[in-house]
Image (tube, helix red, strand yellow):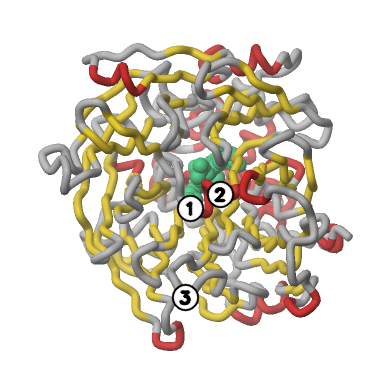
Amino acid sequence: SDAGAAYQPSMTTLGQLNLEIPGRREGDPVMTQEEYNIGNKIYFERCAGCHGVLRKGATGKPLTTDITRANGYEYLRDFITYGSPAGMPNWGTSGEMSEEEIDIMARYILLDPASPPEFGMAEMRETWKVLVAPEDRPTEKMNDIDIDNLFSVTLRDSGQVALIDGADYKIHAVIDTGYAVHISRISASGRYLFVIGRDALVNMIDLWMETPATVAQIKVGSEARSIETSKFKGFEDKYAIAGSYWPPQYVIMDGDTLEPLKIKSTRGMVYDEQSYHPEPRVASIVASHYNPEFIVNVKETGKILMIDYSDIKNLKVTEIEAERFLHDGGFDSSKRYFLVAANARGKVAVVDTKDSTLTALVETGGQTPHPGRGANLMHPTYGPVWATSHLGDETVALIGTDPEGHPDNAWKVVQTLYAQGGGSLFVKSHPTSEHLYVDAPLNPDAEISGSVAVFKLGDLAQEEPEYTVLPIVEWAEIGEGQPRVVQGEFNQEGNEIWFSVWNAKDLESAIVVVDDKTLELKAVIKDPRLITPTGKFNVYNTRADVY
Ligand code: DHE
């Protein structure tokens, strides 16, 4: 009864398209069509996330041909091989790309970028499938799963999600999805789980079925990272929205069937200099609790769009000027304010979702803030604060979020913590927890990327609070490889936190469960099906924005 299995991957990810070689000029290193296809595949899989499909740059530097040709073949080859301290991975010396591949890539980026196809209503409708029609679905919950304490876990490289029980750690289902599901979100009622693959394939999973399975599916583009559902009173489970990187656009869909209803391009002017950008990618999306609005963060143009979904035929969009390179973010503990990192600008933009206005732009003081959804803490001195760690250094910025109770601290960095090192992606806490957890999966030191730093909230009254290190990889007892520990996620009750031990595809991975009160190991979840686990989303916490 796994309807998800009916899906046969017919991936048209950008890397699989055979695009013509654009703009080859005399004197350029020659490239065969076959090499070009390899170059496209590698570029879209490895490079486009940071440098953009059209190579205009974002987290990574621009790679347009005016720049690459000025630098020349040898410079590019060496740069790809050795990387840079500013964040370019060392693709060659790490062994992730062969010499031949690097040679192809250095020649590939001397050519003009290919422009992949658009994805409008006709293309979307062609991919749209309702596997179980709403009238054929159960009218009540058919299983005895405690859905609110279920975890949806991305199995990145196997193109699946695992649904794991928060109480007994049993895997209830492994469901085929798009490749490398980026996030999971839950409908307001808690019944439907939505996931989106990197290849822009959306699965809608019915958690009421005897064995939860996919009931609808659609491809919304060729590269995507975000999905959300309508949460405002009166609109529960009514709409879903997906944002894509390519083409740069978002689509509003029916919340029961994923039928695509409205597609809006995000191409347009950069907020400040008002110059045209051809590829403003859609980063994080959240749903307002105060208004019938989706909050759509557009990376390259630096705009936060408040999409009023109460009348999508006469769509009203409030366009907030924020900052370029908006990426990920989350709500403050009151759920009124949304904080989103403009990562390559070192800032966090704060939006008041009640008034749909920009409240503040906060410099975090660190390099490349990367909060995930962030963490809300009750600080012993400064009251409610929201935390973000940084990709580029060991700092964790705590930003005051209580303009009424603590007006002097609001929207300022009130304290900077020093965790283990750079390469952090996610911080996590819970309203009942006395701790702040900081990962560092991209740190080059295996001991740091394999462990997590924990701060005690009570210690934050000190000027430089110390942290405890949890040796997560060691606890997982994994013999081979160099797994990274990534993204803590609490259970519904808030008394335990799960970490992914993310190993190579062909090696053993695990999920490590930590007791939040004692900071001791509680359980290690291992299963041959747990291939490359990354993001984990507790149904209740994700639905209610508890973090
Ligand atoms: Fe993510 C969140 C984009 C790399 C795991 N990631 C997000 C969001 C965006 C994003 C826009 C916010 C979605 C939202 O809230 O609506 N991520 C990108 C990239 O562009 C980037 C830098 C490069 C790329 O090519 O994808 C990237 N991300 C990664 C990874 O390498 C990670 C660690 C593993 C993977 O699957 O690729 C990864 N990203 C995650 C996770 C979240 C996320 C687990 C959700 C965290 C949360 O707690 O909300």
Q: Quadrant of residue 5?
A: bottom right
Q: Amino acid at mark 3?
A: Gly
Task: In this rendered view, identify the residue nearer to me: 474 or 491.
Answer: 491
Identify the mark at residue 234; answer none if there is no mark: 3
- Contact (Cβ within 8 Å) of mark 1 with mark 2: yes
Label 3 residue SS: loop
Crowding at dot 2, Cα within 10 Å, few <14 / some 14-19 / many 20+, comes out as many
In terms of image quadrants, where is residue 432? Answer: top left
Q: First in sequence: mark 3 or mark 2?
A: 3
User: How far from the left and from the top, in percent, is residue 533?
Assistant: 68, 36
Q: Is mark 2 within 8 Å of ligand 1?
A: no
Whichever of callouts 1 and 3 sits on the residue coming sooner in the sequence is 3
Please name the residue that numbered disc 2 is placed on. 540
Q: Nearer the viewer, residue 471 or 302?
A: 471
Label 3 neighbour load within 10 Å: few <14, some 14-19, many 20+: few
In the rendering, which numbered label is found on residue 22? none
Q: Secondary structure at mark 1?
A: loop
446, above or below 245, in the image:
above
**In-image side of 147 versus 409 (left or right):** right
The residue that appears at 65% across and 62% down in the rendered structure is: 192
